[in-house]
Image (tube, rainbow, N blue to C red):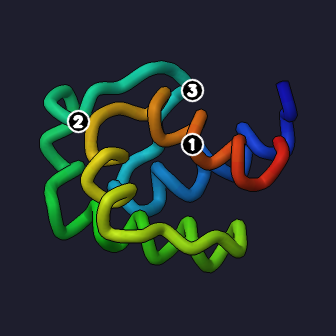
């Protein structure tokens, strides 16, 4: 596990949602602030921070839970 990746992900995720969150698994349904607009903002932030391109299909698939999102991102950035 890459501590730098984890720290940067959770910092970015919390900033986009407007509140700090301890690392863990969160389903979208558990976080009312993770709505569709915030998800698009999160996508833009992740693309900028990690230098990845997230296509429409992935945007939809990643709007589920933090484990899915982090696993997808780790695969692309090699973390």
Helix, strand or loop for disc 3: loop
Which residue is disc 2 drawn over? 28
| Quadrant assignment, res 36 | bottom left
Question: Mark 1 — residue?
Answer: 72
Quadrant where the image shows the C terminus = top right
Q: Is residue 7 shown left or right of residue 61?
A: right
Identify the mark nearer the N-term, 1 or 3.
Answer: 3
Gap in Å between the C-alphas at discs 1 and 2?
16 Å
Residue 16 percent across, percent down from the top left: 40, 62
Q: Residue drawn at (72%, 38%), measured in percent from left and top?
A: 6
What residue would you read off at disc 3? Answer: 23
Q: Could you classify mark 3 by the number of other residues whose Cα lies within 10 Å: few (under 14), some (14-19), or many (20 or more)?
A: few
In this picture, is 67 found above or below 4?
above
Q: Distance of mark 2 from mark 3, alpha carbons?
A: 14 Å
Q: Quadrant of residue 17?
A: bottom left
Q: Tell me if label 1 and label 3 are in contact, CB under 8 Å.
A: no
> Callout 2: helix, strand or loop?
helix
Please tell me which of labels 2 and 3 falls first in the chain.
3
Q: Decide which of tag 1 and tag 2 comes sooner along the chain.
A: 2
């Amino acid at each position: 596990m890459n501590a730098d990746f984890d720290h940067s992900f959770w910092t970015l995720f919390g900033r986009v949602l407007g509140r700090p969150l301890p690392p863990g698994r969160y389903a979208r349904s558990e976080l009312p602030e993770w709505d569709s607009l915030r998800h698009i903002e999160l996508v833009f932030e992740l693309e900028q921070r990690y230098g990845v391109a997230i296509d429409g299909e992935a945007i939809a698939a990643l709007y589920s839970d933090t484990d899915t999102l982090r696993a997808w991102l780790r695969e692309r950035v090699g973390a």
